[in-house]
Image: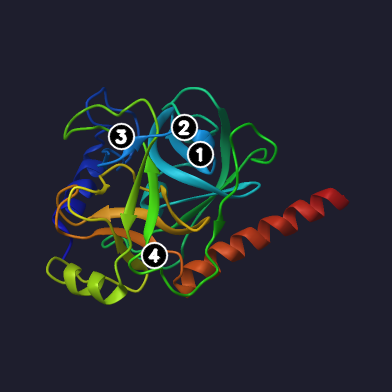
């Protein structure tokens, strides 16, 4: 069974709706919403945070995970063409400032399922490099096979401060508690069938909302999750779902993309 709010996201995408509260962007984006219960922050505090843009419009969050690679959600990449996508880094302000990089290639996890967002992960290769750029830094994906249950992790993104409102102009951040795998599975079972590639974080009044999709969830200087979808209302009692980077298939997929690009860079350097 598909989650109610996830159904809404998919319907909006098919209908070609754009971001909330402004003229629709010409994008198949599912990215609209807010971080609930967060606070405004400066990009220098979270230099790995990126904005994925379609034809100049923000559609999803992303993170810099290698000199030429960004990480986002698989559903942010479905139905898009690389030539229409750009990645903006180094700016706290939505769709302004920083550096805009073209997207040269996107790779979605081979087991990605668009019906339930299983393995909801996509790697983007940019033109240029994130290295030595002002207010842009690389976050390492977790190398652990476990999640820090009960600990606080940080999620960041842009979005509205009320339902059907406009995106806020500045980056926001929120500390959310990571759920245990059992608690996540048990609570999600009331609405849907979760999978091993998913994890839960947040609490009542404290979660991402629809549109922070693709953004990073970070614990102890490592990225442990990717914003995926909400089962019900923003900041409600139902779990907020992230792609779990500690899942072996997800970790292996990301590591393979990083290793492949390192080989490309080495070959280019040697001619």
Which of the pair 107/227 is nearer the observer? 227
Residue at image coords 31%, 28%: 168
Q: Residue 33 lies in what quarter of the image?
A: top left
Q: Which residue is mark 4?
A: 119
> Label 3 neighbourhood size at 10 Å, few (<14), some (14-19), many (20+)?
many
Q: Nearer the viewer, mark 2 or mark 4?
A: 2
Q: Earlier in the sequence, mark 1 or mark 4?
A: 1
Q: Nearer the viewer, mark 3 or mark 1?
A: 1
Q: Which mark is residue 159?
A: 3
* Relative to 52, residue 222 above or below: below
Distance between the alpha carbons at the discs numbered 2 and 3:
15 Å
Q: Are marks 3 and 1 in contact (CB under 8 Å)?
A: no
Residue at image coords 45%, 37%: 51
Q: Which mark is residue 45?
A: 1
> Label 4 neighbourhood size at 10 Å, few (<14), some (14-19), many (20+)?
many
Callout 3: SS: loop
Asked if one can make out residue 253 in the rendered structure from this viewpoint, the answer is: yes
Distance between the alpha carbons at the discs numbered 3 and 1:
18 Å
Q: Are marks 2 and 3 in contact (CB under 8 Å)?
A: no
Q: Which residue is mark 2?
A: 42
Callout 4: SS: loop
> Label 2 neighbourhood size at 10 Å, few (<14), some (14-19), many (20+)?
some
Distance between the alpha carbons at the discs numbered 2 and 1:
6 Å
Callout 1: SS: helix
């Amino acid at each position: 069974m598909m989650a109610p709010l996830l159904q809404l996201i998919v319907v909006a995408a098919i209908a070609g709706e754009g971001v909330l509260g402004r003229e629709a962007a010409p994008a198949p984006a599912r990215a609209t919403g807010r971080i609930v219960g967060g606070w405004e922050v400066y990009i220098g505090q979270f230099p790995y945070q990126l904005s994925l843009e379609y034809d100049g419009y923000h559609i999803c969050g992303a993170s810099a995970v290698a000199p030429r690679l960004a990480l986002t959600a698989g559903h942010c990449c479905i139905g898009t063409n690389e030539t229409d996508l750009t990645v903006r880094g180094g700016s706290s302000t939505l769709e302004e400032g920083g550096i805009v990089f073209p997207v040269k290639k996107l790779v979605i996890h081979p087991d990605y399922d668009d019906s339930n967002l299983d393995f909801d992960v996509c790697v983007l290769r940019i033109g240029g490099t994130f290295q030595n750029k002002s207010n842009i830094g690389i976050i390492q994906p977790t190398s652990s096979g476990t999640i820090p249950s009960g600990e606080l992790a940080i999620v960041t993104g842009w979005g509205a401060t009320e339902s059907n409102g406009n995106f806020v102009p500045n980056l926001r951040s929120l500390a959310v508690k990571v759920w245990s795998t059992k608690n996540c599975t048990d609570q999600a079972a009331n609405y849907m069938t979760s999978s091993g590639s998913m994890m839960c974080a947040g609490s009542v009044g404290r979660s991402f909302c629809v549109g922070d999709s693709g953004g990073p969830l970070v614990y102890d200087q490592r990225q442990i999750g990717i914003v995926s979808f909400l089962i019900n209302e923003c900041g409600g009692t139902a779990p907020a779902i992230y792609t779990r980077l500690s899942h072996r298939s997800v970790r292996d997929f990301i590591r393979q993309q990083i290793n492949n690009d390192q080989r490309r860079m080495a070959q280019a350097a040697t001619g």
